[in-house]
């Protein structure tokens, strides 16, 4: 294994999809890390991938090919989408990482799906034990589950405070904390979350002059969108992205089999477009709009993401019927088309803000 480690002193195992249980990695004495692309210009990945490929995954491959992810001791892939499946194939051939594993994610969200997913988690557990020389006991798993439940509760408490008018935290600050929570040692961000909850401060604008914006979609790990919204005089009250609110919603219940408990929580938590349940996802959007007093919604998806594109038309119909303004954006992960996107965001916020004159 590599000598480069996080401040926790533990080897790092990266993950690219929130359906990978961090608890299993932690129970092996390892540090789970959400992987971020580390290049600003693609140089090598285009030789292996077609043009219309997920820009996030392409950045990850380019980062790996250029040695920018050598601080990782392992990487767990999933079949969350075809792009991630193809990334695993290429990574196993062209990038040397001490440990890689492909975790099968079922499409069924019933008892059969839970049983199947639990069996795949047992496979991951065995591979981690073999690769890192650590026996993962039920007690190890329960301790990791308890730690992650505490972690989720600390972040969820901040999202709960965002229901206030005005919202106490800038969306960009909360986004930064959530990203740190998935990339830094857990205890570090748990302390930060507790400190934030003790000292909530209004975002600066009076309630009648502050449009409340909800952001949803898939991966957003850069602050451009949130900072642009805030600079235009609105507030990102809530973001329900794949590492936003839905990533922390639902704790792991304590049952007799911690593997079953993990499979149940991860498979039945608020889903993305990868899994069935579109009606439930739309109902969730409506509930969040009411709870957080949302004035407008921005749906941001990565370019070429089929699941994001499939979800957009029914979302448009749903929000139109409920008279909630919607802006649909696509981004290339690096937000390189900043000026055009800024113009669209500004125009949208003028429409939303019209009722606040």
Image (tube, rainbow, N blue to C red):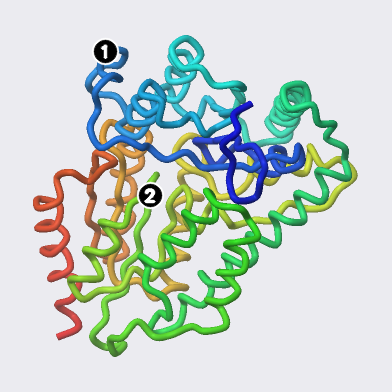
Point 39% across, 45% down: residue: 219
For numbered disc 2, what is the local secondary structure?
loop
Quarter where residue 117 is shown? top right
Nearest the eye: 347 or 122: 122
Looking at the image, can residue 101 be seen?
no
Tag 1's secondary structure? helix
Q: Is residue 301 above or below residue 147?
A: above
- Name the residue: 46% across, 75% down: 162
Q: Is residue 203 above or below residue 298?
A: below
Image coordinates for residue 39, horizontal then vertical, percent: 30, 35
**Labels 1 & 2 near each other (Cβ < 8 A):** no
For the residue pair 15 and 159, the one nearer the viewer reads as 15
Residue 54: image quadrant is top left
Q: Could you say which is closer to the camera, residue 251 or residue 66?
A: 66
Q: Which residue is rendered at x = 65% and y = 60% of the image?
A: 187
Which mark is drawn over residue 221?
Answer: 2
Dot 1 or dot 2: first in sequence order is 1
Q: CA distance from mark 1 to mark 2?
A: 25 Å
**Which residue matches tag 1?**
47
Quadrant containing the N terminus in the rendered view: top right
* Numbered circle sitting on residue 335: none
Residue lying farthest to the top in this orientation: 93
* Quarter that holds the C terminus: bottom left
For mark 1, does the 10 Å Cα neighbourhood hold few (<14), some (14 to 19), or many (20 or more) residues? few
- 41 relative to 209, above or below: above
What is the x, y in percent for residue 278? 46, 44
Q: Is residue 146 visible?
A: yes
Crowdedness near tag 2: few (<14), some (14–19) or many (≥20) residues, C-alpha within 10 Å: some
Task: From the top left corner, tell me how far across and down residue 164 is, in percent.
Answer: 45, 82
């Amino acid at each position: 294994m590599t000598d480069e480690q996080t401040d926790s002193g533990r080897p790092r195992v990266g993950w690219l999809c929130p359906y990978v249980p961090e608890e299993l990695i932690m129970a092996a004495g390892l540090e789970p890390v959400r992987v971020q692309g580390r290049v600003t210009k693609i140089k090598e990945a285009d030789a292996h991938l077609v043009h219309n490929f997920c820009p996030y995954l392409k950045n990850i491959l380019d980062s790996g090919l250029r040695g920018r992810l050598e601080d990782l001791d392992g990487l767990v892939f999933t079949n969350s989408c075809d792009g991630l499946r193809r990334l695993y194939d290429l990574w196993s051939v062209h990038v040397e990482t001490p440990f890689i594993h492909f975790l099968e994610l079922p499409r069924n969200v019933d008892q059969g799906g839970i049983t199947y997913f639990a069996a795949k988690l047992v496979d991951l557990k065995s591979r981690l034990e073999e690769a890192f020389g650590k026996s993962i006991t039920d007690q190890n798993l329960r301790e990791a589950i308890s730690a992650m439940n505490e972690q989720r509760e600390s972040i969820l408490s901040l999202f709960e405070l965002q229901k206030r008018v005005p919202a106490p935290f800038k969306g960009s600050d909360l986004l930064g904390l959530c990203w740190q929570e998935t990339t830094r040692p857990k205890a570090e961000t748990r302390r930060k979350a507790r400190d934030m909850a003790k000292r909530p401060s209004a975002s600066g604008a009076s309630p009648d002059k502050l449009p409340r914006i909800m952001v949803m979609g898939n991966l957003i790990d850069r602050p451009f969108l949130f900072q642009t919204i805030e600079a235009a005089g609105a507030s990102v009250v809530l973001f329900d992205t794949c590492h936003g609110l839905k990533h922390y919603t639902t704790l792991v219940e304590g049952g007799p089999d911690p593997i079953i408990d993990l499979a149940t929580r991860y498979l039945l938590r608020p889903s993305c477009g990868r899994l069935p349940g579109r009606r439930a996802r739309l109902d969730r959007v409506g509930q969040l709009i009411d709870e957080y007093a949302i004035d407008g919604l921005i749906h941001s998806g990565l370019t070429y993401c089929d699941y994001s594109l499939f979800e957009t038309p029914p979302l448009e119909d749903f929000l139109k019927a409920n008279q909630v303004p919607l802006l649909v954006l696509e981004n290339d992960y690096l937000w390189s088309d900043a000026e055009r996107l800024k113009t669209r965001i500004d125009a949208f916020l003028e429409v939303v803000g019209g009722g606040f004159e």
